[in-house]
Image: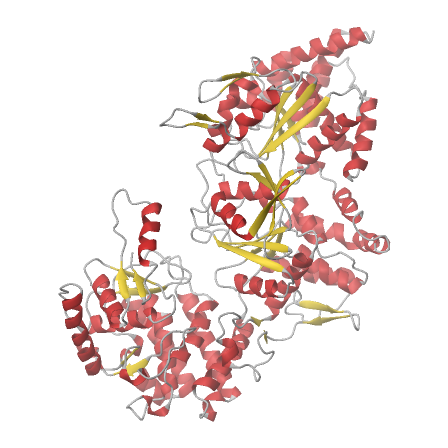
Amino acid sequence: MVASDLCLSSELLSPQQHYDWGLRALKSVLQGCGDILRQDKLQNDQQDEVGLAVKALRLGTQSKLTFVDIPRFEALIADIFPATKPSTKSDVGLQEAFQEACQVLHLIPLETQFRKAEELREQLRRRTGVVLLGPPGAGKTTVWRLLRTALGILESAPSLRVHIFNPKAVTRRQLLGHVDPDTREWTDGILSACVRQVVGERPDVHSWIVCDGDIDPDWIEALNSVLDDNRLLTLPSGERIQFGPNVNFIFETHDLGAASPATVSRMGMVFLSDEDLDVKALVSNWMQCQPDDVQPILSSMLNDHFYRAVDLLLKQNEFAIPTSPAGTIYNGLSLLHNTHHPHAYLVALIRGLGGNLTASARQKLATQLFAWFRETTPDSRHPMDVRYDPEYDRLLPYSGPIMETSGSVEQAEVPSMLDPASPPVVLSATAQHCLDLILPWLENPLHPPFLVVGPEGCGKSTLLHHAFSQLRSAQVAELSCTSETGSNQVLRKLEQACRSSNGNSGRVLRPRHAERLLLFLRGISLPHSDKWGTCQLIAFLRQLLTYRGFYDDNLEWVRLENVQLVASMTHVGSPGCHPLSPRFTSLLHICCMDYPDQEELQAMCVTFLHPVLMASVPSHAGHTSLTQVQSLASSMVQLYEHVQKKFSSEEFSHYVFTPRELTHWVFGLLRYDLSEGAISDSRSNPLAQAWAYEACRVFRDRLVGPVAQEAFDTALSLAIGTVWGPEAQQTLTGGSLCGICKHSSSKAQCWHRRTSILNIGLWCDLLSFSDDLFVTWSTRHASRGVVPQHGKPLCRLSSTDLRIAVQKALLQFCREQWEANLLLVPETLELISRLDRVLGLPGGSLILAGRCGVGRRTCAALAAHMQGAYLTSPRLGRGYSLKNFSNDLKQVAHFTCGLIFIL
């Protein structure tokens, strides 16, 4: 009958990766029957065999069932064993210990957690290894901690020691140990060292080895022999370690998709589901940490609107980043500390619950909350952009863009904008909303980790650095992630920014130069995952957040103190980005940013453009008037939005146009001489020429093919006509300002967010080379200093003067460098001028995308030579590695002249 029940369960219950209805499951039930029979004999409690079998079947099976399968399984038992009734007996002493453990751990007592903890204890009695399986935030860690504390309270329980680590936070070599290939000497890993420690304990000491991380065959298969009845571990060195009955493995994970059926069948299962989550218990637990005078007010407000708002979000499921229900709840509670007034509570609720929603979902949430509170939205178009005025207890919309360097457009000065130590920050309404969301997290004494998510170029890093600057005694350690970033880079950054000290509990890392360290990881979604879908960096960071420490190379546990994790990333689906583990995101507060809308972009562009024009053309009142600046900014935004819509990354991966291009366009004007005598053609407007030329360099140089370039030329011509009239439109769009490559056919396949891209064509119309170009090595600027923040000054040269200058430089280059067989056709001269413009920027970089043999490397070498810079390139080969690249960088790092590194 027991076998029939297991067979029917395999057919009628839902298919799950963690279900096993085979011989090992049957053996476990039969062993449970024997254990119950022996226990009943000791207690003189007589049960019939059918009732005993049903009890053993429930104890061995119910713990692994999903929420929807529990009633189905009970119905099967009722059909197969109709005469039996479900047993309601439980260990009274253990239940009382659970109650005391909740007080010790500051938890709200829940029957579901008590039941799961009791099921975990029963599985640990039957199996060497037990898996705590469930979605993020379901309470897996809480269950085993609750059981550990309760067993410590029970006098009859043996002493218990727990060893915790994340097996995916380190490499397999660091986890299991390794043999030195030269000396054949064995070195223990984290797991093998832990195993030696637990097998050396006294028999009356029980040990749990908690593996809190993803399970995959790379490491779990090494434990298959341990999880069998023989309890034997064979190390890679050939050494065998025998375990006693006083050792258990607990595997805590949210997915068993990579585990083999052989591994699953060897372990007991305790499954926790989202349905077991009690939202009110989480809120009550959070409420206990609030001041006593605030708790009644907060409790009343939370009961009115918080729970139904959470239910609404979970049903809609329009989250920007996948996370757990618990993560959504804690995100919503993160701004409610010491909230007394209903208006402040409303604003905090909109920001907290809307932090991880898409733009449309945030708008709907804000509108719904205003309706529930029966309040009028200050700005009906942007209900999210609202702030609370505590002085008058009212809700106000955010004001227009604010320049933090000076406070207003009229007061903004170029010297402050050019200071590289404090670049200008223009806060739009969207940025002010995000800043008011981020600052409370940074000022929270608990230092909660948080993540800022937004599209490329929306201002995530700029906003975060601005928020960091408002903190006192805070040190920032910034790390830009790549696809190869791992835990070693993070540890190296922590060692540089922290000092080590030894305490009673072991080694501790604390900030070196401030009270608090902000570990800022940019592009946290860029590191790639392994073949099982686990990112080693994310696993390591989750271990830092959960257990506040890590294992060093000496297998010593190192704790972190006063370190706050701050991360940023682009939306999942962007090129090179990988999804984050939901177990990691559920530990973070999340703030989502979006691009500014058209009005905000135009206002921000005016804020930047006005002081730039005041510095470039101070004597021309027409160009610096606010009306003219607004007209020019409007045309710039319209052209940017046209390019963004017309050319998408779906066509070419480097077609990514962000508001950063507008900023580059505006500040690029500072490199041009805009005085009236700077050009020879009296009909031309210097500002219009520089404005159009810089637009071509920012946008047109990225475009592939004559069709795309002609489409851009048309849009630029319309923009010029709108601002400066038909005469300027005819003068400026007839020559080389828009480029002379008429038959470009190259296709770029790569892009970098801070890199200029030049698409190089093969040939062009020689007759079209009749206008002038801008270069940095003109004699006009020989006596003029450089602007290191925005690059070397650019001066206009005629095509004849440009050809003469390049011919002279080419002769000198051939004598000093190598014999370059370069034909100075018009496209070559224009390419050199474009290269010169980018190489004149401090730290300028670019990608030359084009066909082989069009002279990209030779032109780059000539442009570097004309700037007096040294050109170098790594010697790539079959065995070229990161170590070779580091050595090549060291060899050229001592150069005092300009250096051009070409790959």
Residue found 76% across the figure and 10% down from its top: 39
Where is residue 245, by image quadrant?
A: top right
Check the picture and name the quadrant holding the N terminus.
Answer: top right
Q: Using the image as rendered, state which of residue 477 and residue 105 is in the foreground.
A: 477
Q: In this rendering, is residue 844 above or below 733?
A: above
Residue 795 relative to residue 509: left or right: left
Residue 181: horizontal and vertical position, in percent?
Answer: 37, 27
Residue found 47% across the figure and 93% down from its top: 621
Q: Using the image as rendered, state which of residue 639 and residue 510 is in the foreground.
A: 510
Residue 884: horizontal and vertical position, in percent?
Answer: 31, 47
Quick check: can you spot residue 734? no
Check the picture and name the quadrant holding the C terminus.
Answer: bottom left
Q: In this rendering, is residue 376 above or below 174?
A: below
Where is residue 129, by image quadrant?
A: top right
Residue 490: horizontal and vertical position, in percent?
Answer: 51, 47
Residue found 45% across the figure and 79% down from its top: 635
Q: Using the image as rendered, state which of residue 371 and residue 416 is in the foreground.
A: 416
Marks counted in the figure total: 0
Residue 609: horizontal and vertical position, in percent?
Answer: 48, 80
Where is residue 274, by image quadrant?
A: top right
Quick check: can you spot residue 70? yes
Q: How is colour applied across the structure in the image?
A: secondary structure
Residue found 14% across the figure and 72% down from its top: 811
Residue 730 relative to residue 23: left or right: left
